[in-house]
Amino acid sequence: MEPTQPAEDLSLTQQLPIPEFGDPEDPSDEAPDGSDTVVLSLFPCTLEPGNPEPDAGASSPQGGSSLKHSTTLTNRQRGNEVSALPATLDCDNLINKPDEHGFTPLIWASAFGEIETVRFLLEWGADPHILAKERESALSLASMGGYTDIVGLLLERDVDINIYDWNGGTPLLYAVRGNHVKCVEALLARGADLTTEADSGYTPMDLAVALGYRKVQQVIENHILKLFQSNLVPADPE
């Protein structure tokens, strides 16, 4: 008899929104040859009528006019003191701000395997314990993608290794579902629970057998064997 396929509800049914990118710049929007060129400057410039004598080495724009830097003094040049500090960004709020799905920047970066972004966000105070609206976690999504290095970074922050989402999926179940052998090994080495069942009734071993993932099965069997060996108490010699 062929192995029964697991229920579809183990995998996330809602697709991660994919950012839309605009169309490439339309060449027809470019200014035709010979049109005026917009010049960006760090200082305000004013168009002075007439045709005063230009400075040495400076090029005069077409039309018999020249651009002149504004002579208006800034507050700093006048010596004025700032009466109020400018508004500052609330970094803690922004770095953990969720979107409409409840996904934070850290959850998104973990889901797409952006390890350097994950490392940067964690260093700047991103909270790895935050759950999205359907209880998705950064650890579960990293495990789903098989991003073992990110899984390790998150586990170093003492996240719940057995966190479950809306359908009972845990990081280990998602790693098994994706046939991510190294990720399964890492999660088991850190104490992931092998007895946890998804809402579909599958344990990690059940899922590996049903999907025919022999390497994952072997990893789980080796882990169970090590657990038995570590629990064996040598008999006292008499």
Image (cartoon, rainbow, N blue to C red):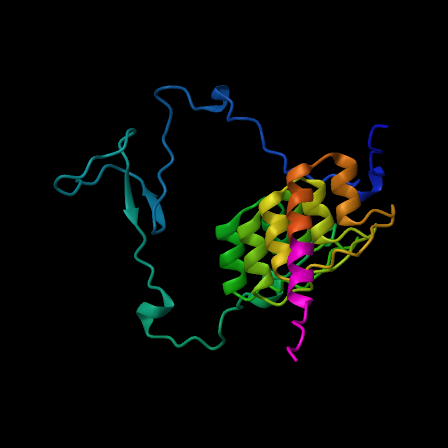
- The residue positioned 82% from the left and 34% from the top of the image is 5
Indicate left or right for 145 with 38 as reference: right
Q: Is residue 125 above or below residue 50?
A: below
Where residue 218 sits in the image (x, y, percent)? Answer: 66, 44
Quarter of the image where the N terminus is located: top right
Q: Is residue 161 above or below residue 6?
A: below
- The residue positioned 31% from the left and 68% from the top of the image is 77
- Residue 47 vs residue 134, the one in the foreground: 134
Q: Is residue 35 above or below residue 133?
A: above
Residue 101 visible within the image:
yes
Quadrant of res 35:
top left
Indicate left or right for 70 with 105 as reference: left
- Residue 224 in the magenta stretch? The answer is yes
- Residue 186 vs residue 160, the one in the foreground: 186
Query: Farthest residue toward the bottom?
Result: 238
- The residue positioned 70% from the left and 44% from the top of the image is 176
Where residue 109 sits in the image (x, y, percent)? Answer: 58, 49
Magenta stretch?
223-238
Indicate left or right for 147 with 210 as reference: left
Query: Farthest residue toward the left?
Result: 56
- Residue 33 vs residue 152, the one in the foreground: 152
The number of numbered badges drawn on the structure is 0
Quadrant of res 10:
top right
